[in-house]
């Protein structure tokens, strides 16, 4: 798998981000990549993506950095720091409802990683609604930022969790379990114009 740091023209619409990302990945499956927004800065949106292929830079998406990672390198007992942008939900009367209380959100996360990892420590960094426009129709969903550390309890299950992501709205920037802190940050590599590539 490949972890990439990508630079897009600034947009806070996750569906627009998703559409731009499709321009730099081949459609090898229904969704060959996961992504999460790292920051919005100076007219640009910086995104971290996990994909089964390296991205292809173009006039709309710049590849700041790209690293090949082995998802099966996380053995039992390994403690990993993580970041996660997710959409915690539950089912009430056969309807999907967002979880708004931090305690409920933390319990949701613990259930989602159960069998693959245990939560060593975690905190809710931020939580709120996210708006998007898809095919002319506006929508909103809840999104929560988590940060903390996990202990791997089942290596195969943890690898599967990384590949699958967590929760709903994966096509809108939710669900990527980001344990790839070693990928250079925007500040470390500087701003590259779209079309330029730095591969590590």
Image (cartoon, rainbow, N blue to C red):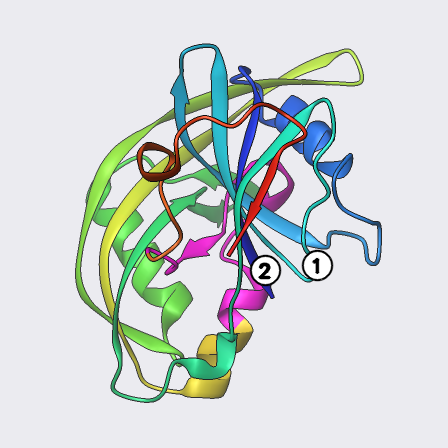
Q: Nearer the viewer, residue 55 or 166?
A: 55
Expressed as whole percent of the image width and height from the top left, the position of residue 54 reads 67, 54
Q: Is residue 152 magenta?
A: no
Expressed as whole percent of the image width and height from the top left, the position of residue 150 reads 26, 69
Expressed as whole percent of the image width and height from the top left, the position of residue 172 reads 59, 35
Structural crowding at the residue carrying mark 2, measured as other residues with C-alpha within 10 Å and reported as few (<14), some (14–19) or many (≥20)? some
Q: Which mark is residue 53?
A: 1
**Figure check: 110 above or below 64:** below
Residue 86 visible (yes or no): yes
Find disc 2 in the rendering and name its residue. Answer: 2
Rendered image quadrant of residue 163: bottom right
Image position of 182 (left or right of 12): left
Identified at 35% across, 41% down, the residue is 185
Structural crowding at the residue carrying mark 1, measured as other residues with C-alpha within 10 Å and reported as few (<14), some (14–19) or many (≥20)? some
Q: Quadrant of the N terminus?
A: bottom right
Magenta highlight range: 161-181
Q: Compare marks 2 and 1 and give the one earlier in the sequence.
A: 2
Give the CA separation, mark 2 to mark 1.
6 Å
Q: Secondary structure at mark 1?
A: loop
Residue 94 visible (yes or no): no
Q: Secondary structure at mark 2?
A: strand
């Amino acid at each position: 798998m490949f972890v990439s740091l990508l630079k897009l023209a600034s947009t806070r619409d996750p569906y627009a981000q998703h559409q731009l990302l499709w321009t730099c990945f081949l459609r090898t499956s229904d969704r060959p990549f996961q992504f999460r927004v790292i920051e919005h800065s100076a007219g640009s949106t910086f995104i971290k993506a996990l994909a089964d292929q390296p991205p292809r830079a173009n006039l709309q998406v710049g590849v700041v950095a790209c690293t090949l990672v082995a998802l099966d390198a996380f053995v039992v007992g390994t403690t990993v720091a993580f970041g996660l942008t997710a959409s915690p939900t539950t089912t009430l009367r056969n309807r999907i409802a967002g979880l708004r209380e931090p305690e409920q959100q933390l319990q949701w996360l613990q259930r989602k990683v159960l069998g693959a990892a245990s939560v060593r420590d975690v905190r809710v960094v931020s939580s709120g609604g996210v708006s998007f426009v898809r095919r002319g129709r506006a929508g909103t969903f809840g999104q929560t930022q988590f940060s903390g550390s996990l202990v791997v309890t089942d290596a195969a299950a943890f690898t599967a969790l990384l590949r699958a992501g967590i929760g709903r709205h994966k096509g809108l920037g939710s669900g990527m379990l980001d344990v790839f802190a070693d990928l250079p940050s925007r500040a470390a590599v500087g701003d590259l114009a779209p079309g330029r590539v730095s591969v590590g």
